[in-house]
Amino acid sequence: MSTDSDSAPVGPDFSQGVYASTIPDDGVFAGHVNGEAIIVARTSDGLVALGGACSHYSGPLHEGLRVGDTINCPLHHACFDLRTGRALKAPALAPVARWKVEEEGGKVFIRGALPDEASPSPALMADKHFVIVGGGASGFAAAQRLRQHGFAGGITMISSDVDAPYDRPNVSKDYLAGTAEPEWMPLKDDAFYASLKIELKLGVVVRSIDAASRSVVLESGGSLSYDKLLLATGAEPIRPSAPGFDQPHVHTLRSMKDAERVIADVTSADVVAVIGSSFIGLEAAASLRHRGARVHVIGPELIPLRSKFGPSIGTMIKALHEANGVVFHLGRRAEGYADGAVQLDDGTSVRATRVVLGIGVKPRLQLAEAAGLHIDGGVVVDTSMCSSDPDIFATGDIARYPGAHGQPARVEHWVLAERHGQVAAAGMLDIDDPFEEPPFFWSVHYDTTIRYVGHAEDWDAIREEGSVADKDAEVRYEKDGRVIAVATINRDMDSLKAAELLKP
Ligand SMILES: Cc1cc2nc3c(=O)[nH]c(=O)nc-3n(C[C@H](O)[C@H](O)[C@H](O)COP(=O)(O)OP(=O)(O)OC[C@H]3O[C@@H](n4cnc5c(N)ncnc54)[C@H](O)[C@@H]3O)c2cc1C
């Protein structure tokens, strides 16, 4: 995932002292010590100083939005407690450093770091065993948050993926492009799981759930009993049933291993047909262009992403990809792949030596369905992510949760899945932390990042401020006289403010 900004130190050197009167009562004040970015804020606990770079992708926290005693990162909306540095909300999964603040002679000095805030000593429910099925965004976030809440029982995370939880959004972005180091991908290293006593069972498939005896049955044989179960099985790419899309050089893109297969298979001599002009298809197209392959994108919409963003942003994104050499075949569906060519529904064909499928995903609901959980296009959950079975929680791509204005929603976003996981962890421990926030995601196309808050499946009106073509815009989607979603380009503060406004 492109970091799309960094947090080079700005402002004065706190080791030399800064007049206390310059630190505002609200917001945060940016400076540095020995080249390290620092923010200082007046909070309900007094004057505090924290590292100024977000622990997720180094976003500049001084450009973020302060809400009470929290600061929200402008890049991907991570949220930190200003008093402790704790990462309250994903995508940040680690705290930011705390620094010691001293006031002398009307000046504020920072000369050294403080130790990280101690996590609570494990105490809760030591005799219980929680099982998490899924080692993706929400499964990982739930496991970590269970320990942060002090859960002292057993945690077993079972994942059919052979890799430990990793940064899935990067699978179609920098990792596929070859511009991300493999070390960037894991969310945490082995030592993390060992120190938090999270047992990882990788490459293991759960075949069924026996809700009556509270156990999960593994495909390899054997079963595991649980006191609480979290289902976080995500979604799987759709492979068209049309002829030829089961051939070896036809790829889907969900896991790190999928990306590695594409990387191993595609060279700069290849012509790749990307089927699907939505997020994953377009991100894959950009990454494969970076690798030097020729890329043709085939999609049914006349303007890519129009159904998600409306015509202006879709047109801008199309132009961006064309400027980078992508050839579009729009308003067209692929009907088969044979003899090195993809056949389109107008009788024409596109020659391609390789194919990448990006035509959408379907939630993995089989386990939940077989367990008899209430399903309505997703596993129906309440605001604590609890399903119709009080001992089974469901999060992320599979969850149908109470969204804005009580409308049930199922949304496939990374940050939302992580936050679902964090809320489910609280729910599994009977801690009140309801899920009450609008979805947020970002999408990167070459040098342009779009941030999006809310959820608009359709709208009555779109209002634009600024210029989408010039990549400086706020686009509001309205339904029944209400703003239901906001997309921004290079207006990060507006995106953060929209997230506050769209809170239920
Ligand atoms: C290539 C790609 C790029 C993306 N980019 C973005 C982006 O830029 N921004 C954004 O907001 N979202 C993005 N997304 C979507 C985002 O990654 C998902 O919404 C998110 O990962 C969902 O999290 P999850 O925990 O529900 O499921 P996942 O992260 O998919 O994890 C599901 C886990 O369940 C495991 N599993 C499934 N069934 C079983 C079983 N029976 N037994 C054991 N294990 C099982 C899987 O192996 C996996 O570990 C992207 C998705 C992809 C594929």
Image (cartoon, helix red, strand yellow):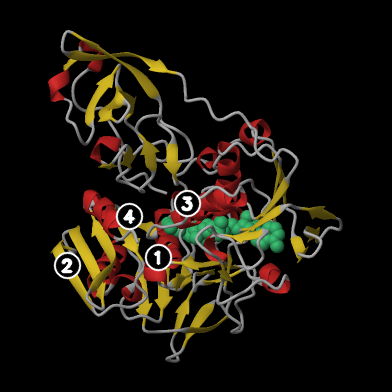
- Above or below, 359 against 118 in this view is below
Sequence-first tag of 1 and 3: 3
What is the distance, in whole Å, between disc 1 and disc 4 at their CAs? 10 Å
Direction bottom: furthest residue: 347
* Residue type pointed to by label 2: Glu
Label 4 sits on a secondary structure element that is loop
Q: For this rendering, which residue is in front, 96 or 3?
A: 96
* Mark 3 vs ligand 1: CB below 8 Å: yes
| Numbered badge on residue 464 | 2
For this view, does 332 lie left or right of residue 422? left
Residue on which disc 4 sits: 446
Residue at left 23%, top 28%?
30
Callout 2: 10 Å neighbours few (<14), some, many (20+)? Answer: some
| Numbered badge on residue 282 | 1
Image marks 1 and 4: residues in contact by CB distance under 8 Å: no
Mark closer to the observer (1, 3): 3
Mark closer to the observer (3, 2): 2
Residue at left 42%, top 36%?
55
For this view, does 314 lie left or right of residue 472? right
* Residue type pointed to by label 4: Tyr
Image marks 3 and 2: residues in contact by CB distance under 8 Å: no
Sequence-first tag of 3 and 2: 3
